[in-house]
Image (spheres, grey):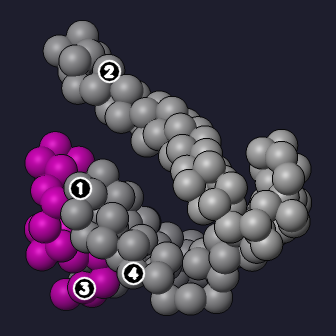
Amino acid sequence: MKKNLPFRTWFYFRLGWSTYFAFLFAAINTLTVTYYLAIEKYPVLFEIFPTFGQYVLYLGITATPILIFIGYVHYKKSPAYKSEADVVMESNPHAKRMLLNSETMLGLTLELLNLITKISNNEKLSDVEKKSILKLQEDLTEHMTKRSMHPSKLPTIFDNN
């Protein structure tokens, strides 16, 4: 952790800056600029919003639900968020590793269920099945020690040969 401290600090700084600091100041800047450079200069708009406080209140009441709806559509109803998630999954080795581990565990679980079913029915394991189990054990041991990110390097848990 200590060797990564500068990078972790940089990450937290960027997160705080972009999520909170920049957001807050961008909102204040937008409200200030639009009021004092646009609304004050047009009498029709100035009659509707005679004070900066009223303008902020009105915009807060109307814009907040609209922006919440836009955020909802972005995450739940449009392909935009799925595309973002795909890019993160493709580029993040930790996410890719979790996906590969999950796929490996599903295959392993299926293989174990097949063996448990066979054993619970008092059936003997064939020599091929025994060899397959030993091969699976070796592959998983190797996988655990090497931890490759490449899908072709994962254990061949679906092979019964």
Image-quadrant location for residue 60: bottom right
The local secondary structure at tag 2 comes to helix
Residue at 26% over, 16% down: 5
Residue receiving disc 1: 93
In space, the residues marked 2 and 1 are separated at their CA atoms by: 21 Å
Which part of the image, by quadrant, shows the C terminus?
Answer: bottom left
Residue at 42% over, 66% down: 102
Residue receiving disc 2: 9
The local secondary structure at tag 3 comes to loop
- Could you tell me if residue 68 is visible in this image? no
Sort mark 2 into few (<14), some (14-19) or many (20+) by Cα contacts within 10 Å. Answer: few
- Residue 1 in percent (x, y) is at 28, 16
Image-quadrant location for residue 105: bottom left
Residue receiving disc 3: 159
Q: Sequence order check: which comes first, mark 2 or mark 3?
A: 2
Q: Sequence order check: which comes first, mark 2 or mark 4?
A: 2
Sort mark 1 into few (<14), some (14-19) or many (20+) by Cα contacts within 10 Å. Answer: few
In this figure, what is the number of numbered marks?
Answer: 4
Q: Which residues are magenta?
A: 137-161
